Amino acid sequence: MKRTIYLLLLPTIILAACGGGDKKNKIDEELTKLKSERAALDEKIAKLETEANKDKPAKAISVSVMEMQPQAFNAFVEIQARVNGEQSVLATPQAAGIVEKILVRPGQHVSKGQTLAVLDAAAIEQQIKSIDAQVDLTKAIYEKQQKLWAQNIGSEVQLLSAKASYEATAKQKAALVAQRNMYSIKSPINGTVDQVDIKEGEMAAIGMLGIRVVNMDALKIQANLGENYLGKVKEGDGVNLVFAEGDTIKSKLSYVSQAVDPVSRAFQVEVRLGSNNKLHPNMSCKMQIVNYKSGNALIVPVYVIQKTSEGEKLFVAEGNKAKAVIVKSGRNSNGLVEILSGLKTGDKVITAGYADLDNGDAISVQ
């Protein structure tokens, strides 16, 4: 009985299964048809939009330009420098001792050989006073022997002995006076007291702290350049000295060292100025050494040049269109760069708004 029922239901199940497959196929066919219709519709819309916008002008990008005209261009090396005296000497005593009195102050003009400070030399002073009596005695004996000898009294030996004794004691006194003079600080040059590094009551030693004297009539500017600039700057190169107060002095390099310091790997350059009431030792300034000149250069701001795989590129304005130009740059200085090729006189280089440009874009020059 159960076998008979199963056999009767089997055709019904098969028919139901076949009906489900047909429905799925119909859905897939409908979906494919709709997608095809949508693609055709999108293509048609795109064509219509292109046709509609064909006669409409593109939105122009606002830019600024600078017209290329040949002009003088100088490139320079800029370094930090300081003012110094051509003659700057630290005066110290010739013997160590306690500073008894300082006789000068910073800013005071002094002469060569002038005493700047005195050290305690009491012991030597006592020796000088002691020998003064011997000098006076030997001098008196010598003079008396001279008078006696003039009267043919006494022997020549006595006269010579008195003379020798007098001269010996006089030399001893002179030696003590010279020793006493070592206990003072004297100016070795004519100049101005720049700095006093000692105090009364302190110990002063040979070659240590003392009094600096600068010849303000012979000032110079000194700076150190890295060894990579050796051979690239020379005596006579133009120099701009820019001070913090805004003052600028134009001069030339007076001296270029040919030796590189083994520690700093730098060499020294100098500009001699003579006297200048506005300058003082140890003032700082910027030294701009002009090491390249061109009287007929096309220059642009450094920032307008873009580095690309094709080379250095910038944009120029041609009518109402932007044109990309490949250029070759040269020396740059103070934010400007010389263009060696790619531009000509009269070209209008785009200096603002170039970041959003592509070759051929519409532009509006402001």
Image (cartoon, helix red, strand yellow):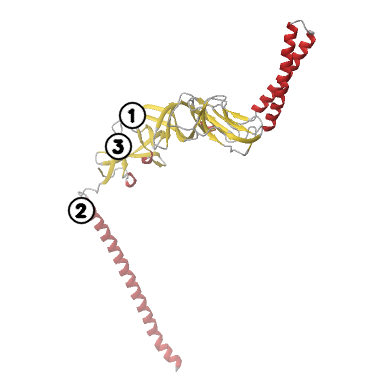
Between disc 3 and disc 1, whose residue precedes? Answer: 3
Please determine whether, in this image, residue 344 is positioned above or below residue 17. Answer: above
Please determine whether, in this image, residue 362 is positioned above or below residue 31. Answer: above
| Quadrant occupied by the N terminus | bottom left
The percent position of residue 274, horizontal first and vertical second, equals 46, 25
Between disc 2 and disc 3, whose residue precedes? Answer: 2
Between disc 1 and disc 2, whose residue precedes? Answer: 2
What is the number of the mark on residue 66?
A: 3
Would residue 183 appear left or right of 61 to someone viewing this image? right
Q: Nearer the viewer, mark 2 or mark 3?
A: 3
Q: Are marks 2 and 3 in contact (CB under 8 Å)?
A: no
The percent position of residue 182, horizontal first and vertical second, equals 65, 28
Displayed quadrant of residue 362: top left
Q: Which residue is mark 1?
A: 71
Q: Which residue is mark 2?
A: 52
At x 61%, y 35%, the residue is 100
10 Å crowding of disc 1: few (<14), some (14-19), many (20+): few
